[in-house]
Image (cartoon, helix red, strand yellow):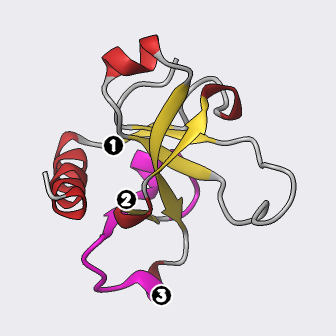
Amino acid sequence: MARRGDVVELHRPAGFGAAVLRHAVVVQSDLLNQQIGTYVLVPLDIRQDIHFGHPGAIPVSATEAGLKHEQVALVASVFSAPADRVEKGAQGSLLPATLARLDDVLRRVLSL
């Protein structure tokens, strides 16, 4: 089961947009991860240049993401996905400082 701050890989959906999303950060509480059949996620994107300076884009190191390249967490694009679309086992996990930055932006995006 994925935990808050984990970078997960998603099964690609069939149809429109299938090639767009592949990795995301789990942002919902661990308690909910155990109780509901969906995850609340923030997508990751490798294209840092097009998101540079965007207030809703948080840099994520390749080490944290467990991937070959640096990523950008697109906080304003938060979404939910069924748990069966999430691969078992995390690719990586955000450092506490990165997760705190993501949380701060998420609070602003959602007016919390």
- Numbered circle sitting on residue 50: 3
Residue placed under numbered mark 1 in the picture: 94
Name the spot of residue 32 as percent of width and height, x first. 37, 20
Name the spot of residue 12 as percent of width and height, x first. 77, 48
For marks 3 and 1, the one nearer the N-term is: 3
- Numbered circle sitting on residue 44: none
**Mark 1 is on which residue type?**
Leu
For the record, the magenta segment spans 49-69
Disc 2 and disc 1 in contact, CB within 8 angstroms? yes
Residue depicted at 79% across the width and 60% down the height: 18
Residue placed under numbered mark 2 in the picture: 60
CA separation, marks 2 and 1? 8 Å
SS under mark 3: helix
Residue depicted at 32% across the width and 15% down the height: 31
For marks 2 and 1, the one nearer the N-term is: 2
SS under mark 1: loop
